Amino acid sequence: MRSIKILTLFFLSISLTISQNLQISGYIQTDDRIKLKDKTISWEEYRLNLTGQVEFEKTKFFSEIWLRNFGSSAVKKLSDLSDKNYVEPVNIEIREAYVDVKDFLIDNLDLKIGRQRIAWGTADKLNPTDNLNPDDLEDIWDYGRHLGSNAIKLSYYAGSFAITSVFIPTFTPAVLPRGNWVKIFADEFFTTDFPNLEELYEKIKIQNPESSLKESSKLGLKISKQDILGFDFSISYVYGRDDIPIPYKTIYSFMPMPSDRSVPDSVYLFFPRMKIIGFDFTGDIKGVGIWGEAGIFYPEEVNLEIAIKTPQYTTFNKILDKKNYTRFVFGLDYTFKNGIYANVQYLHGFLHERGRENLKNYIVFNFERKFMNDRLKVNFLSGGAEFKALKNIKSNYAFIYNPQITYNPVDNLEFIIGGRIIDGKGKTTFSKLSDRDEIYLKVKYSF
């Protein structure tokens, strides 16, 4: 009995110590969007974000959780009405949950273990070197979002140098956009145009890598150096798999005609291996912020097997060359004397584009000004442009205009109203969304 009392007092003292150090913060956010073409709801998300942190002298515990409701019912049959998971879908997601230990084993060596977001790169949300965590493309307009990964991260600091190593034991694929928004990735999954992509989705099968460390793990190494002529630099290396799948086999019942858009019986996708060498920098020249980064990708060669049952026939078509290709971004920002803030980036190769011949060009821009003691912010010129090459820009382009107004009536509360006007032509990524013009309203309270 005495030992039980001592043990009880021990755990009570730990709980009291933790409660005294516990810091809780987060936000509540609503996000409603309406498609202008048919006045239908294109997005309806209500999110509660909770972060908790307990920090001691050399140890920190951190977690972030999302609780979300997407508003729209998922009911499709009578029995679904008895299940709240269908009637009122709620999603609980552990974004991060890790322990961070300073001076682990030796001085200046930090250990972080658990579910964590490991963000690499210096660009504004468009990062060709940010390849450790899986892409979270659920909301295609939330650029730069990633899932957390269960990982072990070691960081050693020596003056202005930092060496970081990362080990992720399991493979997790990217989250693709909800509903038929996934059609913007159609060129990555299919090698032929089909009149009804939704019909083909049901025939696609995914081959995940084996769960062994050899097949599923990912490794990362990064060396950073601060303040070289006012700039910070880093070089990195990642070995793992692409988190967006690519087809490696299609099966047809009959031989398709040259002009035929026959739907195959099945399509098989897998996640190819990838080696990535990264480089980035960031700095300031006379008040102008400058950054850039590049990822050199060394892919696994992929030959698509096309199998036909009648007549029996098999052929192969190379869809991903083993030659390396480079995605890069360069950007700058500046605040003018009249208070206008400008941010412009040029990107070569979006996150899903693979192969030298398939990389497109993107210019992303944002011009904004604040009023009323910074309580009102107007993004009057915001959006982006996409083109394959300047010589045929008239037939292959996309343009997005995204004006937005943000109002903070009181501290920690903001109202955001905006819209997206999309136009395009040809085989560009965002031209596929030219019928998706929308307006939106967001409300966010932080605590």
Image (spheres, rainbow, N blue to C red):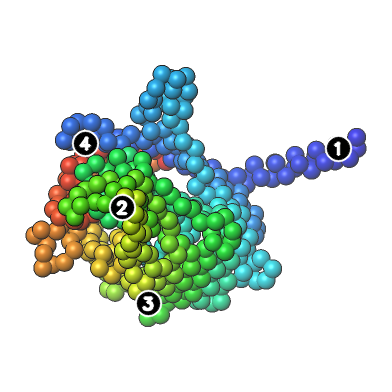
Cα distance in 3D space between marks 1 and 3: 60 Å
Labels 4 and 3: the sequence-earlier one: 4
Look at the numbered disc 4 and give the secondary structure of its residue: strand
Quarter of the view holding residue 416? top left
Look at the numbered disc 2 and give the secondary structure of its residue: loop
Labels 2 and 1: the sequence-earlier one: 1
Labels 4 and 2: the sequence-earlier one: 4
Instruction: Return the x and y of residue 401 as percentages of the image width and height.
Output: 17, 50
Left or right, 125 with respect to 400, comes to right
Instruction: Give the label on residue 384, or none.
Output: none
**Labelled pair 1, 3 in contact (Cβ < 8 Å):** no
How many C-alpha atoms fall within 10 Å of the one at disc 1: few (<14), some, or many (≥20)? few
Instruction: Give the label on residue 35, or none.
Output: 4
Labels 1 and 4: the sequence-earlier one: 1
Which residue is denoted by mark 1 in the rendering? 4
From this viewpoint, which residue is outermost toward the front? 311
From this viewpoint, which residue is outermost toward the left? 394
How many C-alpha atoms fall within 10 Å of the one at disc 2: few (<14), some, or many (≥20)? few
Cα distance in 3D space between marks 4 and 3: 46 Å
Q: Nearer the viewer, mark 2 or mark 1?
A: 2
Write the residue at 46% across / 76% down. Answer: 225
In the rendered image, the quadrant that contains the N terminus is top right
Please state which of residues 376 and 60 is positioned toward the viewer in this rendering: 60
Labels 3 and 2: the sequence-earlier one: 3
Instruction: Give the label on residue 311, or none.
Output: 2
Q: Amino acid at mark 3?
A: Gly
Q: Nearer the viewer, mark 4 or mark 2?
A: 2
Write the residue at 17% across / 52% down. Answer: 259
Instruction: Return the x and y of residue 370 as percentages of the image width and height.
Output: 24, 50
Left or right, 77 with respect to 429, comes to right
